């Protein structure tokens, strides 16, 4: 006997993600799901972004971390609301974990809620958190072949940030190969070439984020 | 690693459906994955077999259909399968595309008695 089901296996996650998306939209908050491999520079990007925007914009952060609160501690100095989700070995955040921590924020007092996902290029792109959009952060030291290897993330991302461009002279990273690869996967996505330690290219990223806020209002 | 979480959610759906259908044994589970989700079938099969251990689905065979990545050009309306990760319209070259298929994680049916 065969029983037809025809159901999304992750519909529990998807349904909760839609709830989260409606809630944050109703509060006029933009939720940005930041996805990268470990060490690409997500936390440093958040540090620079907080330095630029706090207190002009009201920022909150959800830190997805496997076991520690080290990333969150790096952001404490900006005096912004931060909640850590320890996944206890889990390789991604999901919408239920986000939903559980949202009551810790006063969403009426936020403009942007950044979610720093667990460092991983495959799993997080599969789990909708209810974010407004995803961004992908890659760094030059990881090599120039990432878009073709992880097409789902680079298709889904609303922007791609290529970090550590100051280190290119010390690597075999080819900007042309990277751009060609990204163009093949997603010819529409904006690319920001940045160095979070030296500051290159960040002005364009800040401007783009401001535009996203303006568009959402 | 995400294979395990997906296998857990699949197991919950399979057992819930089997209970509703008054099955005493699940013999087969039919699922579809889009190519973009990058599930490794061997890892998924292992994860699923661990999840269903000691349940009425413990001997169920898993049939995985892989769906191609299919896009529609929003400029000229052409539909095409993406080959070799080239996300550009085969007809007009535009990269302004809408995904029609390729992100599925779908359970189609279960078989049992």
Image (cartoon, helix red, strand yellow):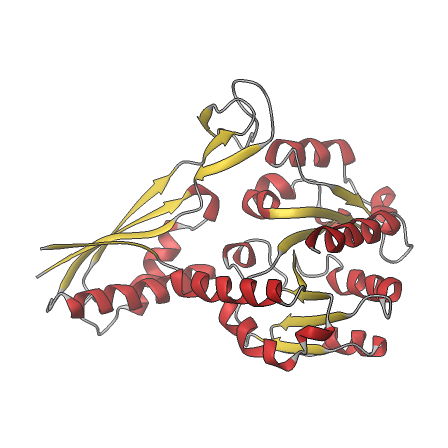
Q: Quadrant of the C terminus of chain B?
A: bottom left
Q: Residue at x 72, y 41 (%)?
A: A190
Q: Residue at x 70, y 46 (%)?
A: A160
User: Can you see residue A92?
Assistant: no
Q: Residue furthest top?
A: B91
Q: Is residue A46 left or right of residue A203?
A: left
Q: Is residue A23 left or right of residue B70?
A: right
Residue B79: image quadrant is top left
User: Can you see residue B106?
Assistant: yes
Q: Is residue A79 left or right of residue B94?
A: right
* Percent of width and height locating residue B33: 37, 47
- The one nearer the camera, A39 or A199, is A199
* Percent of width and height locating residue A22: 54, 63
* Percent of width and height locating residue B58: 21, 67
Q: Residue at x 78, y 70 (%)?
A: A58
Residue A136, relative to residue A47: is it above or below? above
Q: Residue at x 34, y 51 (%)?
A: B106
* Percent of width and height locating residue A53: 85, 64
Q: Residue furthest bottom?
A: A104
């Amino acid at each position: 006997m065969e029983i037809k089901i025809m159901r999304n296996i992750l519909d529990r996650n998807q349904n909760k993600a839609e709830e989260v998306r409606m809630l944050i939209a109703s509060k006029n908050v933009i939720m940005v799901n930041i996805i990268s491999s470990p060490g690409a520079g997500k936390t440093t990007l958040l540090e620079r972004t907080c330095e630029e925007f706090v207190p002009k914009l009201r920022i909150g952060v959800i830190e997805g971390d496997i076991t520690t609160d080290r990333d969150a501690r790096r952001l404490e100095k900006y005096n912004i609301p931060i909640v850590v989700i320890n996944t206890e070995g889990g390789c991604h955040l999901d919408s239920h974990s986000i939903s559980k921590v949202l009551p810790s924020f006063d969403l009426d007092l936020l403009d942007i809620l950044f979610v720093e996902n667990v460092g991983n290029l495959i799993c997080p792109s599969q789990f909708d958190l209810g974010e407004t959009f995803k961004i992908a952060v890659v760094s030059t030291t990881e090599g120039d072949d990432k878009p073709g290897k992880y097409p789902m993330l680079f298709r889904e991302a609303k922007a791609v940030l290529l970090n550590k461009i100051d280190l290119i002279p010390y690597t075999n990273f080819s900007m042309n190969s990277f751009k060609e690869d990204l163009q093949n996967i997603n010819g529409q996505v904006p690319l920001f070439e940045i160095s979070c330690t030296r500051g290159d290219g960040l002005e364009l990223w800040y401007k783009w984020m401001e535009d996203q806020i303006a568009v959402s209002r | 690693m995400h294979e395990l979480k997906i296998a857990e959610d699949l197991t919950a759906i399979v057992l819930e459906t089997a209970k509703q259908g008054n099955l005493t044994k699940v013999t087969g589970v039919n699922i579809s994955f889009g190519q973009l989700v990058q599930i490794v079938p061997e890892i998924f099969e292992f994860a699923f077999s661990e999840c269903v251990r000691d349940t009425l689905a413990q001997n169920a065979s898993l049939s995985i259909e892989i769906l191609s990545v299919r896009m529609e050009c929003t400029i000229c309306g052409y539909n095409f399968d993406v080959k070799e990760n080239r996300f550009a319209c085969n007809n007009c070259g535009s990269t302004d595309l809408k995904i029609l298929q390729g992100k599925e994680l779908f359970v189609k049916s279960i078989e049992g008695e």
